[in-house]
Image: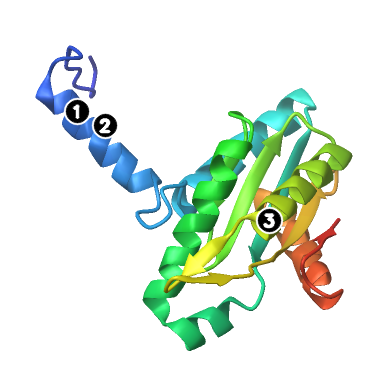
Amino acid sequence: VGRSILKFMTGENIEVHYHEETYRLMTVDGLTQVFNRRYFNEALEREFNRSKRYDRLLCLIAFDIDHFKLVNDTHGHLAGDNLLRQLAAAVKPRLRREDIFARTGGEEFGILVPEIPLDGARTTAEKVRRIVEATPLKVDQTMVPVTISLGCAMLGAEDATPDDLYKRADERLYEAKQGGRNRVSG
């Protein structure tokens, strides 16, 4: 059709499974099995545009692990990787299906929370903080107390690009760290 080539594939076609797996590998972080930064950026742009166009609510939660470098320095990078896997596995099932949870950096994560006001995002962030704090995480058969700092921001009229929203959430994250860590700011 025009310059496009269309191909009909059934669900039992091995090529369909190949393309599905290729897509999954492109959008899911191999270590944590949550969405990767690439997918998160695309989802942020999509949700940002939808929220602006239809005047809908959108919040973003940014968080990272407190003193993660100390874990890597003390126990090694494999132990740090294991900790990231455990943290993602503890948080992911406790979020809404509509929320987009992704690893956005080394020990950094983001959660897009559509259709919820800032107070609701703070509640979600506090819930995630408590889950991580209460979850027994093991490093080399040793229980390691882990906490996270979180920053929340809600889409506002002043946000011209998705990066503006992300930047404000990131600023709130650093406020939480400067305020003593293991807390929610925003």
Question: At 61% across and 29% down in the image, what residue appears?
Answer: 98
Kind of residue sitting beneath label 1: His
Residue projecting furthest to the bottom = 73
Mark 2 surroundings within 10 Å by alpha-carbon count, few (fewer than 14), some (14 through 19), many (20 or more)? few
- Can I make out residue 105 in this image? no
Q: Closer to the camera, 183 or 75?
A: 75
Circle 1 sits on which residue? Answer: 17
Image position of 85 with respect to 171: above or below: above
For the residues labelled 1 and 2, the Cα–Cα distance comes to 5 Å
Write down the quadrant of residue 7 in the picture: top left
Furthest residue in direction left, as rendered: 14
Disc ID at residue 134: 3
| The N terminus - image quarter | top left
Give the SS element for disc 1: helix
Say which quarter of the image contains residue 174.
bottom right
State the residue at coordinates (78%, 52%). Answer: 152
**Rendered location of residue 113, percent (x, y):** 69, 38
Question: CA gap, disc 3 to disc 1?
Answer: 38 Å
- Disc 3 residue type? Ala
The crowd level at tag 3 (other Cα within 10 Å; few <14, some 14-19, many 20+) is: few
In the rendered structure, find residue 20 and report the number of the disc placed on it.
2
Label 1 with label 2: CB-CB less than 8 Å: yes
Chain-order first, disc 3 or disc 1: 1
Quadrant position of the C terminus in the picture: bottom right
